[in-house]
Amino acid sequence: MSEREATTPSAVAPETERALQVATRPDPRSLSTVLSKLLSSLHFKLLVAAFCGFGAALSLLVMSDITNQGGLGKSTSSLAFLPLSSSNSNSSDDLSRLYHAYQSLTVQAEFANRTIQTQQHELSQLKEALEKQKQAPKVFIPDKMIVVAQFNEDFQWLDLYLDEIAHVIYTRTNPKAVHNLEPNLGNEASVYMKYIVDHYDNLPENVLFLQAHQETWHIPDVTRGGQNGGNMIPIINKLKWGVHGFASIGTSNWNKVQSDDVLDHRAAWAKLTSIWPKLFQDALGDMPPFINRYCCAMFLVKKERILLRPKSFYQRALDWLLSGEFPNYWSGRMFEHTWGLIFGEPHDAPQYADGICHYTYC
């Protein structure tokens, strides 16, 4: 061969040139090529999977490392937990391992996505509840409350002498009053029931139920040992709020009501017997053989005693009182006998040994 022939490139046949190009072109079936395509298509899902924890995040970093370095052969330290073979004979096994790892990450990503959606829903509900609570009107619930049933009595003494104690007055003859209960049926019993029904869900801790008299024959006199004919103001000022679950104010008049009692009580007992199944049976059980009680439907009771009976009981009693089935005298008398039972006192409750000092500081 001459010097000229040695320095001049020899001609290459076209068939040979195409064969060389094919030989140097990346094999589309090779593991590196398959992985590059696979990883580029899964990039977004793997980012979501990273929220599942450290393991998912580490897997994402490893696979990104593989992609950035152009194949499996250049990423040996990152694949300690997922060994891959560099030989073509094991490429199928390597791809299977990666595929299963991808499936695991996808499941974790879907679980994380559902968890995030659930938490977002719960957070939205919590925000909505907080907004409703902010917008709800604030209800002031005093520790002590006086509920007064007024017909035509002068009740100015409540504001003059007891302005520091919350009180509400239910009238029966003044349609312009804030609280006017019509029709005028059931005497004080319908007023007491009305207050309980209206405030059942936000009752004060202690409620004193009164008629509107400042002075009357059945109010004990704290200045004369509890004799009849007293004044309500000294009693209220010395009252033992929160001491007793139930305490009757009329301690000067104690009765054992039963069928063989005085004429008025016998008539009341007969009427009570006739309405017991309809009004009291489900809440108080069978009618007792007698009832020990003080007159005259004025008493102090704690909230927990009122809540012994469901609101439906008080609503039913109110409806019955306003129905006029019995005249006022008898319908009011039915409840005068049973207030103690309604508020958790036994039917054979003994007479207060200390009289008026039972519920006032003598």
Image (cartoon, rainbow, N blue to C red):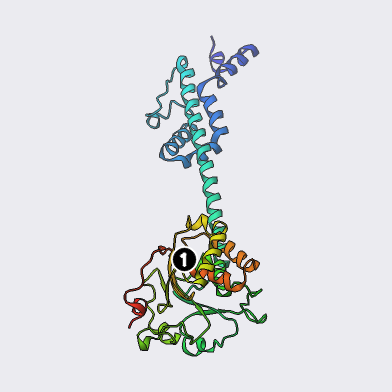
Q: Is residue 281 at least partly visible in the picture?
A: yes
The residue that appears at 59% across and 72% down in the rendered structure is 186
**Farthest top residue in view:** 1
Instruction: Give how far across and how far down residue 212 sits, in percent.
Output: 53, 82
Query: Nearest the camera: 256 or 21?
Result: 256
The residue that appears at 51% across and 43% down in the rendered structure is 115
Q: Is residue 138 at least partly visible in the picture?
A: no
Q: Few, some or many C-alpha atoms within 10 Å of disc 1 (few <14, some 14-19, many ≥20)? A: few
Is 68 displayed left or right of 194 in the figure?
A: left
**Farthest bottom residue in view:** 160
Query: Nearest the camera: 355 or 244?
Result: 355
Tally of numbered discs: 1
Image quadrant assignment for residue 352 = bottom left
Q: Does 181 appear above or below 29?
A: below
Query: Dividing the image into 4 quarters, which one contains the C terminus?
Result: bottom left
The residue that appears at 57% across and 81% down in the rendered structure is 150
At numbered mark 1, what does the secondary structure look like: helix, strand or loop?
Answer: loop
Q: Does 157 appear above or below 91?
A: below
Instruction: Give how far across and how far down residue 117 sits, in percent.
Output: 55, 45
Is 85 displayed left or right of 109 in the figure?
A: left
Which three-letter amino acid code belongs to the residue tagged 1? Answer: Asp
Instruction: Give how far across and how far down residue 286 sits, in percent.
Output: 48, 55
Q: What residue is pinned by disc 1?
A: 260
Q: Does 36 appear above or below 17?
A: below
Instruction: Give how far across and how far down residue 19 sits, in percent.
Output: 60, 14
